[in-house]
Image (tube, rainbow, N blue to C red):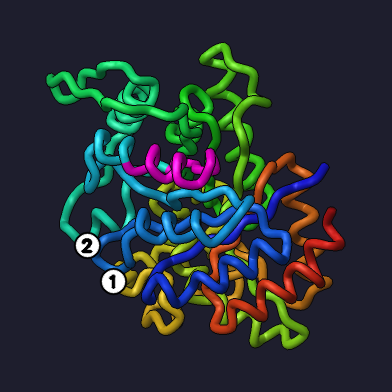
Amino acid sequence: MKVQFDIGILPQEPVAGFMDLIVAAEELGFGGVWIADSQSIFRDVYVALAVCALRTKRMTLATGVTNPVTRHPATIACSIATLDELSGGRAILGLGSGFSSVQTLGLKPAPLKQMEETTRVLRALMGGQTAIYDGKEIKMTWTARQVPIYFASSGPKSLELAGRVADGVLFQVGSVPALVRYAIESVRRGAIQAGRDPREIKLCARLGCAVSEDREAAREEIRAYAAAAAETVFQSNRQGFLAPDLVEDLRKLKEHYNYYEHANLGASHKTLVTDRLLDAMVIAGTPKEVIGRFEEILDLGVDRIVIPLTVKDRRKFLEDFAQRVIRYLH
């Protein structure tokens, strides 16, 4: 089975600073780019994706991810439809409940009911129909097509909801095969409950990765992102799949996690990421180690892998990963 590899961008620098990187990723064979939306710590996702649309030719362009708390559904629909039009139909709407974007504003994540309602409204607006939202009629006076909606889900109820109503799911549950299997089974269960064919829902795993012949250097580079992944796993209560010592590691990290340093290479909380926690959350090591661990994940039926670029030398990582990992997995 051929699996698509995408990249994830946390736009912590000026947009112009990472455009050449995205162009290089396309040339190296990566299939898509997912750009995070968190207004307090990142540059704007739609501005960045619009520039990507003009600089690339075939990559899918996704919000990775936006949310219905800081953005009204009508605004989301207009923005993603504009991007889809600009890119010639390459847009994907990644939609989540909100993570650092809501935490930094003192707001609460969107409940699942709001996620489902937002999806209904978005599809109506993109389909040229009038929708009722918060008791009011809203519509979009122009439309191009139904942009695929992928839920960012990690908890069991969210994953099942994705299976019931979304076109795809972007899950971040760590790198332990048992956790990935649980995520896939949850999505499929939701699809069956809704009378859908589970094969219709695209399965995307978000997995932090670092690869180098210098094993320890690779592991140190990805430690901060492992903290971000661990925070997601802790919030989704997937602790039942982890050994008690890992659960304790997660608890200690949770107590000191700083959302303003979310996945920052120098994040102070990365010192709390133990080696066992790192190995449960991300994939890092020599090319041989990395290939072996990805094979375990791909064998479970994942359609797409999204790798957030959180290492220091991102261009070198792209080249190394394309030449020393992807070519041996296809």
For residue 114, side relative to residue 306 (left or right): left
Kindly identify which numbered label has been placed on residue 314.
none
Name the element at disc 1.
helix
Task: Give yes or no for residue 73 being in the magenta stretch.
Answer: no
In this view, the residue farthest toward the top is: 195
Residue occupied by mark 1: 260
Residue at 74 percent across and 47 percent down: it is 3
Q: Nearer the viewer, residue 319 or 58?
A: 58
> Residue 222's image quarter?
bottom right
Name the element at disc 2.
loop
**CA gap, disc 1 and disc 2:** 7 Å
Q: Is residue 63 visible?
A: yes
Name which residue type carries label 2. Answer: Thr
Q: Name the spot of residue 187 as percent of width and height, x first.
A: 56, 31
Residue at 63 percent across and 25 percent down: it is 200
Q: Name the spot of residue 293 as percent of width and height, x first.
A: 76, 61
For residue 103, side relative to residue 23 (left or right): left
Q: Nearer the viewer, residue 83 or 207?
A: 83
Task: Give yes or no for residue 80 being in the magenta stretch.
Answer: yes
Range of magenta residues: 79-94
> Residue 259's image quarter?
bottom left
Q: Quadrant of the N terminus?
A: top right
Q: Is residue 281 visible?
A: no
Instruction: Specify which label sits upstream in the sequence, 1 or 2.
Output: 2
Kindly identify which numbered label has been placed on residue 104.
2
> Residue 287's image quarter?
bottom right
Q: Name the spot of residue 186 as percent of width and height, x first.
A: 56, 32
Q: Name the spot of residue 57 as percent of width and height, x first.
A: 61, 54
Q: Is mark 1 in CB contact (under 8 Å) with mark 2? A: yes
